Amino acid sequence: DVFQSHEEDDRKVRRREKNRVAAQRSRKKQTQKADKLHEEYESLEQENTSLKREIVKLTDEMKHLSEVLKDHEKICPLLHCTMNFVTIPRPDALASCLPR
């Protein structure tokens, strides 16, 4: 009877140790998963910041080019210069429209 009790105790100890190791492994896996997600998040945040900067630059460039186009349209001898080129290409009209 003492022998049986000792065997049960050994089994409980082994089971507890096995559970402890499994729990430790599970925590480690969860930590690694959380670390990986955090790294991905940081990477996406950096990419997002970079894209926002690029959008600001492109928006500024678009505003500048729109102003340049408006200024050009004011001094261009042809009305609707672009429409004329699209419908009937006229090299002489293009030459008079471009700066000399």
Image: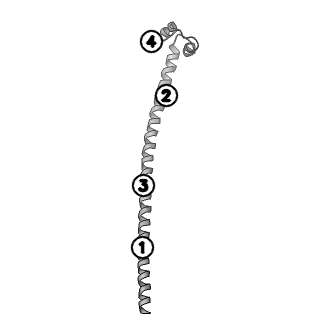
Q: CA distance from mark 4 to mark 1?
A: 82 Å
Asked if labels 3 and 2 touch by Cβ distance under 8 angstroms, the answer is: no
Q: Nearer the viewer, mark 2 or mark 3?
A: 3
Which residue carries the number 2 mark?
63
Mark 2 element type: helix
Tell me which amino acid carries mark 2.
Answer: Lys
- In x, y percent, where is residue 48? 46, 43
Q: Which residue is mark 3?
A: 36
Q: Nearer the viewer, residue 83 or 26?
A: 26
For mark 1, what is the residue? 20
Numbered disc in front, either 4 or 1: 1
| Crowding at mark 4 (Cα within 10 Å: few <14, some 14-19, many 20+) | few
Which circle, 2 or 1, is nearer the viewer? Answer: 1
The residue type indicated by label 3 comes to: Lys
**Residue at disc 1, secondary structure:** helix
Bin the neighbour count of mark 3 within 10 Å (Cα to Cα): few under 14, some 14-19, many 20 and up: few
**Rendered location of residue 45, percent (x, y):** 44, 47
Q: Secondary structure at mark 3?
A: helix
Location of residue 32 (image quadrant)? bottom left
Dot 4: element: loop
Provide residue 97's location: percent of width, then percent of height.
Answer: 49, 11
Q: Against 60, is 82 above or below? A: above
Q: Residue at left 43%, top 69%?
A: 22
Discs 2, 1 touching: Cβ within 8 Å: no
Asked if disc 4 and disc 1 are in contact, CB closer than 8 Å, the reply is no
Q: Give the residue at x 52% y 20%.
A: 70
Q: Circle 4 sits on which residue?
A: 99
